[in-house]
Amino acid sequence: MMDLTQYPLETLAQQVGTPFYLYDGAILRERMAEVAAATAGASLHGRYAMKANSSRYVLDAAREAGLWIDAVSGNEVERAMRAGFAAGHEPPVIMFTADVFRDNALDAVVGHGILPNIGSPGMIRELHEAGYRGPIAIRVNPGFGHGHVEACDTGGPSSKHGIWYEEIEAVAALAQSAGFPVVGLHAHVGTGPEIGEFDRNMSRLVGVFDDLLQRFPDVTSVNLGGGIPHPYRIEGERYDLGGYRTLMLEAASTLSEAAGHPVAIEIEPGRYPVAGMAVLVARVHDVKETRTNEKGPGHRFVMVDAGFNDLIRPAMYGSYHEISIVGRGASRTPEPLVVAGPLCESGDVFTRDDQELLVPRALGRPEPGDLLVLHDAGAYGAAMSSNYVSMGRAAQVAWEGDRATLIARRESLDDILRMECHEPL
């Protein structure tokens, strides 16, 4: 976790208001460098899945580390290019992965020569009708893999992503008919609840691709997806990227031998380089209680000004984030507390499990005015935030050495209303 004593949190809160995101640039660059080192060499490539955090500040760090990009929308393609990532597919610095072409996605792929990673058979027809005449990659659903809850499944029968492995022959025929060489194969099976499961899933994927390569002689890269585990709990285990590099090099050797020509291995580190580089800082406004009755036990609620419009992972997935109190409550004896936000939604609670049950945390009871910090909020925090109930998205502050820089100002009502119009159609 970030050492909160390094940052003038109260001063920053006074300057930009709460809630706000604080990014530590040194941690960000360190994690990006770790991924770059693990994927160094002609047979390996690292792709940053920018949906985790698409801030220009983060994209610059990924580009400087030499990582490529996995984009999942047309605007992500355009955003990556504005951040200096090259278009075209020689090499495919930006890959577009999706199951549906929406908005400007098809135009971005065709217009910029971006390598499309096909997740649904109908996308081949759409590409051909749009005039695309380049290579493609195919995302495979290998029939296994899952996240920490079913809502996060990225492989297996419950996942919408990719083309079911038993349907690959038919899709290969569609690609051949359209004149699209299949130069890449891709699968993403998620982290799973244990680090050991991630390694086992990666090994299983190599076996799946070993078989598929016989059907696709033009494949020059195989993408093992991502989901490198991040320890959200204090007692959590850091994943060994050195061991992962060994696994990837072995996979490159195995698949190159199976194909009869060099096959590079790609990975998408997902949350790994960004999750731990940020916190969400909120202000405590009150502490109130409910009493035990026939419906269940009572709770003490710490009411803060951050809600699921700022960090939706706990409400959506029951995801766990460590919590710290900064202020008078920090030195008090811990007691069980529920942390809740300002939204008019019962689900606006940060201390909830994946069964949607309240799970109080042992925290020193804060006073109104204290700061409360949600840790490891760099992945899918600001990126999934919204202006629900017309609340502006939180400001984002970067910390470099001993200096703070505002990298995204708080969204105003004028920002929210700017898109409204009254135009006859």
Image (tube, rainbow, N blue to C red):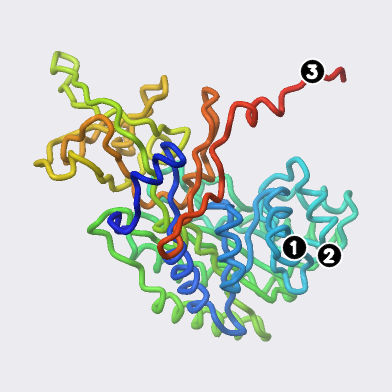
- Which mark lies nearer to you, 3 or 2? 3
Q: Which residue is at the front of the view, 168 or 16?
A: 16
Kindly indicate whether the residue at mark 1 contacts the one at mark 2 (C-beta within 8 angstroms).
yes
The amino acid at mark 3 is His
Residue at 68% across, 85% down = 261
Mark 3 and mark 1 lie on one chain; the one further toward the N terminus is 1
In this image, 5 relative to 41: left or right? left
Instruction: Estimate the x, y position of residue 397 in percent, counting from the top left.
Output: 48, 50
- What kind of residue is marked 1? Leu
**Which residue occupies the foreground of this view, 383 or 285?**
285
User: Distance of mark 3 from mark 1, alpha carbons?
Assistant: 38 Å
Chain-order first, disc 3 or disc 2: 2
Q: Which mark is residue 134?
A: 2
Q: Quadrant of residue 403?
A: bottom left
Q: Is residue 190 visible?
A: no
SS at circle 2: loop
State the image coordinates of residue 421 (x, y, percent, origin top left): 76, 21
What's the CA distance linking mark 3 and mark 2? 41 Å
Q: Is residue 249 above or below residue 373?
A: below
Q: Residues within 10 Å of mark 3 (few under 14, many from 20)?
A: few
Q: Nearer the viewer, residue 337 or 73?
A: 337
Residue 422's disc is 3
Task: Give the residue drawn at x 57%, y 84%.
Answer: 41
Task: Give the answer, above or below, for where 32 lies relative to 365.
Answer: below
Q: Which residue is mark 1?
A: 115
Quarter in which the N terminus is drawn: bottom left
What residue do we see at 71% from left, 55% from top?
77
Report the disc number at residue 6.
none
Q: Is residue 23 left or right of residue 96?
A: left
Q: Secondary structure at mark 3?
A: loop
Q: Residues within 10 Å of mark 1 (few under 14, many from 20)?
A: many
What amino acid type is highlighted by mark number 2?
Gly
